[in-house]
Image (tube, grey):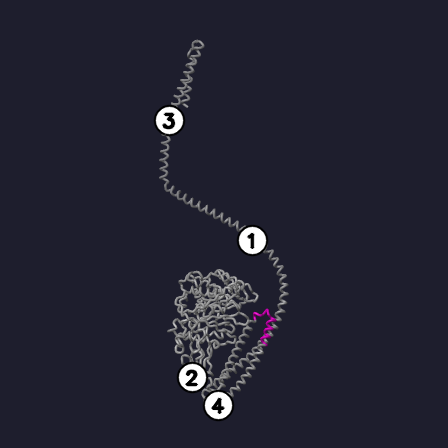
Amino acid sequence: MMSFQIFRFNLIMLENTAKSIEIPFLPTSLWVLTTGISLILVLLACGMYAWYHKRFKAVLNDSEDVADLAAQKEIFEAEIKQCQDWLNNNKEELLRLDAERKQQELLRQELANLETRAAQEQQKVDDLSKESTSLQNVISTLAQDRDRITNETTAGNKLLEEIQGELKKAQDESENAQRKMHDVVQQYQEEKEKLDIFEQNVKESTSEIIRLENEIKQYQNQLNSVIKEVQKLEVERKQQEILRQELESLQLKITRSQQELKNILMSVSQHEIKHQGLIVEVNVKQAQLEEIKGKIRRSNEELEGIKRPVGIGADTGDKGSYDDLFKIKPECFMAEVFPGGNYENRSEVQSLSDILQFLKNQGLSFPKRTVYAFHTSLKINDISPITVLAGISGTGKTLLPVKYAEAMGMHNMVVSVQPRWDSPHDLFGFYNYMEHKYKGTDLARALIRMDQYNFREQIKDDERRADRILLVLLDEMNLARIEYYFSEFLSKLELRRAIKNAEVDNRSIAEFVLETGPRGNTGKEKSDGKGEFRLWVGRNVIFVGTMNEDESTQTLSDKVLDRANVLRFGKPPNNLAGIQNERTTAQPQNKFLPYNLWKEWIKKPSVRDSWLNDINEWINRINDALEKVGRPFGHRVQQAMREYVANYPGVADGRTHKIAFADQIEQKVIPKLRGIDFIGPQLNESLEITHRLIDELGDEELSRAFSQSKEDRSMGTFVWRGVTRSLDDMRV
């Protein structure tokens, strides 16, 4: 502003100076020149003034800026000192405010989190709102359905009343049939009482025969008196003949009663399941009747022996009494059976391979899975003393054990079970008191030679077979009731497990005692006048049974099922014919498999086995399923399952424990379900648990067969028809 005033002052002075000067008259050209020079000078002066002014202004501004800066510096220094004083005075307050600021930051962050959660909860509320809307729609639909069902229920009640009327008529008819059945049963009971009386008479007659036999022994020199006694017995025999006729008459009445009972059962077929117990009782009575007839038959045989003069066919001492057992060699132990001697080294894997090839060369088609299962079942005969092959006729049940023994190098014996068998005598023989001789069977002769502890004086060392293996096949074992002729012997086989060392332990609890005469193989006579003929059946004797499942055969009891592995054969494979055409000549082994080598193949389960936990879990699950239908199994069966898995080929490598346990479900679990009524949810639940476990084990063929039996309810009970194994099943 000041520089502008100075510039204006200079202009005014220049203007006043120009007015005070008098300009003389000059020529125009000079005047123009002068004017031009003056303008140039003025311009120069103006330029110099402008440069000077600019320069002056810059200096002036710099001076003013320096002054201003100095003043501001003083102000700023004062303010800084004031701030430092304020900062020193308010340091604690600043710290407090800083802490509050940090807390506010945390609160702000938590608030953000809460806002996020609130948004999520709001989303859930929105979803629930949508779901509520959907449920309301469903409720509306259900209300409509309820109204429809109410209408249908009204109609159904009317139909139910009609059905109840028809049902009452059926019940009346059923009551009439039951009254008729009661009359028949009452008549049957009367006939049974007569049979009991007759049986008592038979016992009394038997006692009388024994008394007369003792009198004959005491008075052998008094022939006349003996003849009189024989004549007396002849009279009694005639009385027995009369009783036998009465027995036949009673049997005819029972047959007629049975026929009438069948007619009644046919008229009330809808109640057939409830009356199965009566049919079973009739079968039991028939079996008892057969037993009575057998006793009468044996009494007649003894009576015929008494009628012969004393000394004819009799042996005054024990010499020759057991020649039938000791001197007659069983056919299965002929010297030429294994002329090549014994196998010194033979692996289990190679033996199984040889068996499969031998069967193929024989034109026989058994799945590898079936052969492995059969082989494993034989290895655990210590805890499962018998292996049962069941199924329809013509599936190779008999051929498999026979050919297996031939290929493996075992002695084998086929025992054909007869329908009339009712005691162990039919299996092992009996002592004929009239002839003073033991009537033995080929099985008894073979077991004596397999016994490594008894009969050392009677059997030569070169005829003993304690170092070999004998496979005994009870063919069609259920033609007779197994409990009658095999139950006692089976119990002895099971007790072998309690004998750890037969050399030093008391093995008498597991020895089978044959019914003998006054003396047995021990030469001792007990207080009842009978001798002891003790027989040790070692673990080198393996028992196998076959059974055809039809209306003419008996079923297995729970006692036998718990002590057996049941392999049920399904229908033959469709490609059986093609395999039979490949039959070639194959010779059985000429060497025998020693028992010591067989024992090396047998394994025991251990806590170190990797598969043991799985097996224990599956056992518990399957036992819970069986408990729902009242048929659980005990520790014996559980232990048998573990030993089966431990002895299955390849299980040590962790490859086949699922296959092995699936076999046990087929062999031990499913047979226990047979015959259970499809009534209530228990059976369905048990079947579902079992089926899920089978699927988990991966046995597709067993799963399909089990599913078919589960869905087939035409018989009203669970019916197991077995598994049809494919010949190319190479999972094992």
Q: Nearer the viewer, mark 3 or mark 2?
A: 2
Q: Distance from label 2 to label 1 (Cα)?
A: 98 Å
- What numbered label is drawn on residue 62? 3
In the picture, residue 410 is in which quadrant? Answer: bottom left
Residue 424: in sight, yes or no? yes
As drawn, the label of residue 317 is: 2
Q: Nearer the viewer, residue 320 or 144?
A: 320
What's the CA distance linking mark 4 and mark 2? 24 Å
- Callout 4: SS: helix
Crowding at mark 1 (Cα within 10 Å: few <14, some 14-19, many 20+): few
Closer mark to the observer between disc 1 and disc 3: 1
Q: What percent of the width, then of the height, locates residue 509?
A: 42, 75
First in sequence, mark 4 or 2: give its number: 4
Label 1 residue SS: helix
Q: Spatial distance from mark 1 to mark 3, Cα to Cα?
A: 87 Å
Give the residue at mark 4: 225
| Residue drawn at x 42%, y 77% as measured from the top left | 534
Q: Residues within 10 Å of mark 3 (few under 14, many from 20)?
A: few
Q: Which mark is residue 135?
A: 1
In the image, residue 664 sits, relative to residue 225, either above or below, namely: above
How many marks can you see?
4
In magenta segment, residue 398: no
- Residue 83: quadrant of the picture: top left
- Mark closer to the chain start, 3 or 4: 3
